[in-house]
Amino acid sequence: MLTKGPKGTKDMLPAESRKWNYVEEVFKDVCRSYGFNEIRTPMFEHTELFTRGVGDTTDIVQKEMYTFLDHGDRSITLKPEGTSPVVRSFVEHKMYADAQPTKLYYVTPCFRYERPQSGRLREFHQFGVETFGSHSMMADAEIISLAYSLIKRLGLKQVELRINSVGCPKCRKEHRRLLKDFLNDKKDLLCETCQTRLEKNPMRIIDCKSPDCQHHIEGAPMMADHLCHECREDFHQLQHYLNSMNIPYTVDKKIVRGLDYYTKTAFEWVTSAAGAQGTLCGGGRYDHLIEEVGGPDTPGVGFGLGIERLLMVMEAEGVYLPEEQGDDVYIAAMGEAAIDKGLSILTQLRELGLRCQMDMMNKGFKGQFKQADRLKSKLVLIIGEDELERNEISIKELATSSQYVVSMDDMKEKVLEALKK
Ligand code: HAM
């Protein structure tokens, strides 16, 4: 028990965190180039934010939240997603009073009590972006384009964009009635969850993974075919912008998303490269969420992309990752006086920004050279008694095995020269 992490969690060991840092740097770079600024919000929020924001009929709120009472008897929830906390912060800090749009990005852990499997964790991480304040479909297209830039920069090929419109409360009311009429006499044939959904949130039945439910919704009225004039126009406009931006997509009327706050645009980037959990990125527009959590009537649009899934897809597609950098310098020293000198050189070289290390396991010269090899060091600086006496130091360039002696006074200059080769 003590030596095993909790179910659904994953340690990020150095080999993995190197890839993580790389994708995070690319993500941040893409966000900056689109004019987004970083926001960081706390790991936990008042539970009500999610019951209101994500929606109390969703799987997340009904079954998956990590909720507890704190010592002050407040109900607290570890964030299951990134959007609601960013919206809360937007309202709390009155960012709506600034010139709009507000464009924010984040990297955050999320917590959902789901049945763990490959690509599905209880603690996972998201890259997310949110744009507040624009009703224009240009904001939706920009968000989608940002995800596309990231996917292209990382070299992924087997990822596809699917888009849909989930309408607005006005047109959804009529669609809900039509869908309920269609499914009413099939109610007993649906899975237990969908029988409840039929009453509370029938559109979610379209998204059910059960093959039986999928069979029974064949021919059901789809939201995209029953949009009001404004939603239909917006959906056309979005496709027009995506065409202008050369972003390939497919309209998939079955995309309904698992969170209640969406209006109009809903989209997913899906892949078959990473097994059962095919959705890499999901997002859309949410024009009433900000008002729902107590802010002024302000539209929003964004996406969340699972970092663990991203790394899985990259692995499955065998895409390029930058090589691990070796050390610049290894200092091999024997004897107390040489070690003292070595420590002083180590400090000076680190101050120059070089990556250098020295033995702390009491190894002989042979063992120290082996370690230098393992660390992929470019140079080994050798300090023995002879070198010390003559105020000199030997430099060995590991790539060519050439070795030469330099005066200790020229050491920094010669090291930098050798590293440039
Ligand atoms: P979501 O679809 O629930 O949307 O999650 C977004 C992404 O997070 C998924 O596509 C997936 O890659 C990843 N993800 C979700 N659950 C898990 C899990 N249990 N294990 C591993 N990865 C997972 C949202 O969270 C919305 N906040 C996205 C959004 C932002 N919409 C507008 N703005």
Image: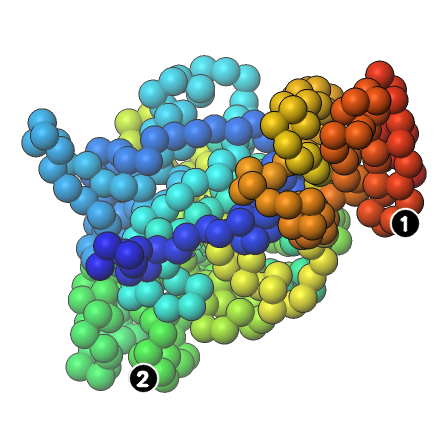
What label sits on residue 212 in the rendered view?
Answer: 2
> Which of the marked residues, 1 or 2, is nearer the chain's N terminus?
2
Q: Quadrant of residue 143?
A: top right
In the image, taking residue 90 as reference, residue 52 lies left or right, namely left
| Disc 1 from disc 2: Cα separation | 66 Å
Residue 125 x %, y %: 44, 48
- Marks 1/2 in contact by CB < 8 Å: the verdict is no
Of 229 and 179, which appears nearest the observer? 179
Q: Position of residue 232 (x, y in %)?
A: 53, 53
Q: Nearer the viewer, residue 402 or 286?
A: 402
**Where does label 1 land, which residue?**
400
Asked if residue 324 lies left or right of residue 263, the reply is right
Categorize mark 2 by other alpha carbons within 10 Å: few (<14), some (14-19), many (20+): few
Q: Amino acid at mark 1?
A: Thr
Q: Looking at numbered disc 2 in the image, what kind of residue is underneath it? A: Asp
Q: Is mark 2 within 8 Å of ligand 1?
A: no
* Secondary structure beneath label 1: loop
Residue 171 image position (x, y, % from top left): 38, 53
Q: Nearer the viewer, mark 1 or mark 2?
A: 1
- The answer to which of 244 and 373 lies nearer the viewer is 373
Residue at 49% across, 52% down = 13
Q: Residue 225: x and y, percent?
A: 47, 64
Please tell me which residue is depicted at 23% across the width and 77% down the height of the picture: 191
Quarter of the image that includes the N terminus:
bottom left
